[in-house]
Every structure is written in structure tokens, then in C-alpha cells.
Image: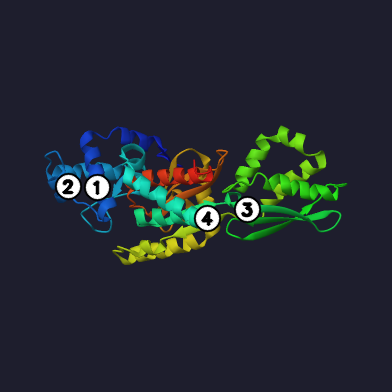
Amino acid sequence: MTETPRTLSTPHQFQALAALNDRAREIFRQIVESYLSTGEPLGSRNLARILPMALSPASIRNVMADLEHSGLIYAPHTSAGRLPTEQGLRFFVDAMLELGDVGQEEQARIEAQMRAAASRHTFDSALAEASTLLSGISRGAGVVVTTKMNVQLKHIEFVRLDMSRALVVLVSDDGSVENRVLELPPGLPASALQEASNYLNARLQQGRTLGTLRAEIEAGRQAMKRELDALTERLVDAGLATTVGPSDARQLIVRGQANLLDDLRAVEDLERIRLLFNDLETQKDVIELLSRAEGGEGVRIFIGSENKLFSLSGSSMIAAPFRDGSQQIVGVVGVIGPTRLNYARIVPMVDYTARVVSKLLDGNR
């Protein structure tokens, strides 16, 4: 289910991990799960009490030394306990993570809240609700990246400015209006503007987005050729192309930053969160990182310095793409938080939320 952007890559690392026996894997698992649960290092004496096999603290320390040599754990400061390294977390997520399930009650709650937000307000409201839900589930920051292709449209109008230019007017379901200047094909009759407007508005069913409209028109290209003359057809194509051009910046929705201030244990934690807040303020970089999750199917997990954006704050991101009615990836939902996120719970939640968003974009199927 998970697809990750980077895995352990050196021959030494592969050999070390392949050599882990059941005892070493169990000790490593306990150290990681303790870290994900408490954020605290785990020592040999405490390990001896919770391991399912009988091992002395001395034997555990020998195994821990091997795990440390492999680069999977480390000793913070002068503590006798150990924490997983970023490399160790990556190995745990790739090879040992046991994903939970999204219960039927949780599925129903997520879908009901997002559908209610979409029906009361706009699709953007549903995306904001998705971000808020993921924030509450993860105790991290819920994030969504989308484009204006997902805006639900109410009306499209072509208004002539002069012989060579027209204004494309887009009215969204929420009442917002956007205008774009369009170069007209030479020799275009005045009637073509009204004809193109009528053609597009006839296809703007309730909840239809610009992306879905473009996909439908492209799929019905031959039918459009029969209905419209060549110049009007060019006008329709040019109008749709103009409404989403290079100047359309992606939209970033972030909810729950305050969650990141909970459970701070040290001055270093406060500094890490300050740096993460700075990262979230740099929307361009966050959008770029989230957009990398559009590169494949399923959930992607980015841990710490695997991405330059989190190299200082030591944060993680779990993200999954969502699709429009034509099955094109048009955005990403996810969670950003400390590296000790509850991956087993959050990964399936992010995946399910992305699928609900896709349903909403596909006409509430």
C-alpha cells in the first residue's frame, strides 16, 4: 500500500538488515514502537522486562550495539537508552510496519463530514474539512494541495472586448468570479461567443469542475465537431486552456498547526517546531513536496532529511493523491508532523481520505 521516495541504498545497509535475526528485529521493533509512542529512548533494563523472550540486559546491550553499528539506532546524549535513526525509521516503515484498518464507523464519519461540508458550501470546504479531519486524527498538521481545476463551476461566459480579444468569465458555486483575457481566432462571428457559452454551460451539471468539464469535452471531441463550426470549436478550446494557465498557483490548505505545539518535551523540540512552522510558511516548498506524492499510486511517506524541506526540523509527511472524474490526479492530501507520527494509524487514514475526496470529485458516486 505504501510507496516511499527513498529506501536503504548501500550494500552495507542491505547486508546488515538481511543479517538481523528474530531477536534483533524484536529489540529493534520495541525501540521504534516505544519512540513512536512516547518519544523517549528505551534502555536494556526496560527492554528485558517487555521482550517476549528471556534475555539479560547484557545480551540486549550486545544486540543494541550491533543495531547501532548498522545505523538503525543511536544513543541520544549520554542516555543509556536508544532511539531509532531516520534510516531506522525508514527501514521500520518499509519492512516492518503493520498497518491498521479504518473502521466502518470512522469511514462513515469521515465521508459524512466531508459530504456535508461540500453540500453546505463548496468543494474547497470539503478539502478544508479533509485537512481538519487528518489534523485531528494525527495530532499533526493536515495539509491539502489542489488546483483551480477542482473549482466547482456555476457559469461560463465569453464577453467580447474588441475585434481580437474577449473576456472569459468563470462563476464558481461559491459566487466567486474570475476573469481572463482571451485572444480570438481571426474572422470569428459575434454569434460564436454566445454559441460557445451555451455549449459549455449546457455541460455544467451540479458539482462539475473545470477539470471534469475539460476531460468530458476532450472525450466527446467528435460530437463537438458535429455541433460547432471550426472557429467556435477553437474558441471553446482556447477558453478552457486560458482558464487554467501557468499563472494558476496551486492552493495549499493547512489545518492544525497548533497540534504541533502539544507534548513538547525539551528546548530542542520547541526549536524543531519553530523550524517546521517556518517550513509551512514557505508554501512553495511545501506544495513542491506534496506534488511529489502525485508521482505514483497509493500513500507516500517522507521521513526527515530525505527531503531538504525537513532537513532541519526533522519532520515527516504522509501523503496520498486524489483524482477527478476522469481519473486524473489533481491534488494531494496528507499529514505533516514529527518523525514519531503513528504511521500504522495515519497511513490508512490518509489513503481513505484521499479516496473520499476522489469520490466527491467524481460526482458523489
Residue position for label 1: 31
Q: Earlier in the sequence, mark 1 or mark 4?
A: 1
Q: Secondary structure at mark 4?
A: helix
- Expressed as whole percent of the image width and height from the top left, the position of residue 67 reads 27, 42
Mark 2 and mark 1 residues within 8 Å of each other at the beta carbon: yes
Q: Earlier in the sequence, mark 4 or mark 2?
A: 2
How many angstroms separate mark 3 from mark 1 (CA)?
54 Å
Give the residue type that dot 2 points to.
Leu
Residue position for label 4: 124
Q: Secondary structure at mark 1?
A: helix
How many angstroms separate mark 2 from mark 1 (CA)?
8 Å
How many angstroms separate mark 4 from mark 2 (CA)?
48 Å
Give the residue type that dot 1 points to.
Ile
How many angstroms separate mark 4 from mark 3 (CA)?
14 Å
How many angstroms separate mark 3 from mark 2 (CA)?
61 Å
Q: In the current view of this chain or complex, which residue is farthest to the right?
A: 187
In the rendered structure, the answer to whether residue 214 lies left or right of residue 194 reads left
Residue position for label 2: 47
Using the image as rendered, state which of residue 164 and residue 95 is in the foreground: 164
Image quadrant containing the N terminus: top left
Mark 1 and mark 4 residues within 8 Å of each other at the beta carbon: no
Which mark's residue is nearer the viewer, 3 or 2?
3
- Expressed as whole percent of the image width and height from the top left, the position of residue 137 reads 35, 53
Q: Earlier in the sequence, mark 3 or mark 1?
A: 1
Q: Earlier in the sequence, mark 4 or mark 3?
A: 4
Using the image as rendered, state which of residue 4 and residue 361 is in the foreground: 361
- Expressed as whole percent of the image width and height from the top left, the position of residue 37 reads 26, 52
